[in-house]
Amino acid sequence: MYGPERIHPFRTPRAILLAQDFSPSFLRKVADLEVPITPILYRLGGIGGGSAHSLELVKEAVASQKIPARAARRISLMAASARGLSPEELAAGVQRTLMPQACPSVRGYDIAGTTLSRHALGGDTYDFLRRDGNRLWIMVGDVAGKGHAAALILSHFHAMIRGLAASELPLFQLVGKLNDILSRALPINEFISFFVLELEPEKGIARYVNAGHNPPALIRMSGQTEFLNGSGPVLGVVAGSVYPAHEIRIDPGDTLLLYTDGATESQNADLEEFGEERLVQCLREVAAMRSEQGLAKLQRFILDFCGPVPRFDDITLVLLRRIPDRLPAV
């Protein structure tokens, strides 16, 4: 893993190289790259002679390879910092790299997002992708299931989106392609709910496609509530499914909330769900706030409702607000 910023490698990697073995000549070439590098070597070990495997740190890898001293020092330092981490902790670190490190800055808009995972490895995701013509994609997804399997599916899903995005397909075709690929690749009973919105900031035009996901809630500046309805099936179940595209306008003062079902299905001690109606009521209370503050308050509403009851699902929230011509006091 290496990166020009030389930041924590599990949070800002620029490359992850996986292979059964690396030759000394390859390691020398990696060490000579004109960027700071922090390689970490692992081997895949069996568990109890069965088909299960674990990720084991190769603590003595440096001694067996003739590589430059500067690379050896970096490997030793990273080995020391990674020693003691479980495979789940390592995987969780890699998963964090797939999540946005910061929300995009878009003139005239205020955007914030967060995921509260139930465990170290979660099945929720959100992401942003800038497109030509000053467009922005905002995406939220939820993988059926949790743990390592969901995390692995999410990592492939992120890569698929970026690969297909390069073709500049319209949203409905891109989502259809994602579904066709996942329908062939995912095991039975595995699927992904997914929502993607393409924003043209200057015009306030938002096109969206929904694949079996919770419809986002839009609070107009007038106080009127709308839902971004219109959905196709979840991804990965029926190949050849059609995904309709829709278009709305986001005006100054409007606030849009994208979320996963962990928000509405969170329960309190009486087994009462937080619910869509309560979520909209809370959204009304934060609609005039700046997005980061409003998002923090929404989280608090949900967690206070649950009280001491453990959450059974991940919660993802993305709040987008088009700044009004005149900012209210907060």
Image (spheres, grey):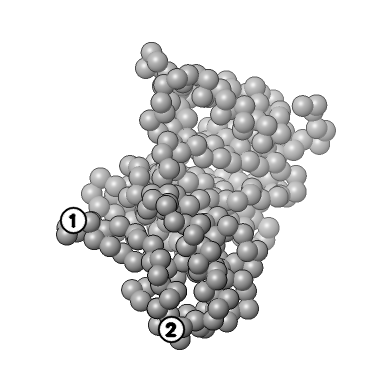
Residue extending farthest to the bottom is 25
x and y percentages locating residue 224 in the rendered image: 62, 25
| Label 1 environment density (alpha carbons within 10 Å; few <14, some 14–19, many ≥20) | few
x and y percentages locating residue 152 in the rendered image: 37, 54
Quarter assignment of residue 256:
top right
From the viewer's side, name the closer residue of 249 and 310.
310
The residue at 61%/71% (across/down) is 36
x and y percentages locating residue 306 in the rendered image: 46, 21
| Label 2 environment density (alpha carbons within 10 Å; few <14, some 14–19, many ≥20) | few
Q: Is residue 190 visible?
A: yes
Residue extending farthest to the left is 49
Q: Is residue 239 visible?
A: no
The amino acid type found where label 1 is placed reads: Gly
From the viewer's side, name the closer residue of 210 and 275.
275
Which residue is identified by label 1? Answer: 48
Quarter assignment of residue 142:
top left
Residue extending farthest to the right is 326
The residue at 26%/58% (across/down) is 53
Location of the C terminus by quadrant is top right
Which sits earlier in the primary sequence, circle 1 or circle 2? 2
Which residue is identified by label 2? Answer: 24
The amino acid type found where label 2 is placed reads: Pro
Q: CA distance from mark 1 to mark 2?
A: 31 Å
The residue at 45%/27% (across/down) is 264
Indicate whether 5 appears above or below 204. Answer: below
1 left or right of 201 in image:
left
Indicate whether 320 appears above or below 104. Answer: above
Indicate whether 141 appears above or below 168. Answer: above
x and y percentages locating residue 317 in the rendered image: 54, 37
Q: Secondary structure at mark 1?
A: loop
Q: Which label is found at residue 263?
A: none
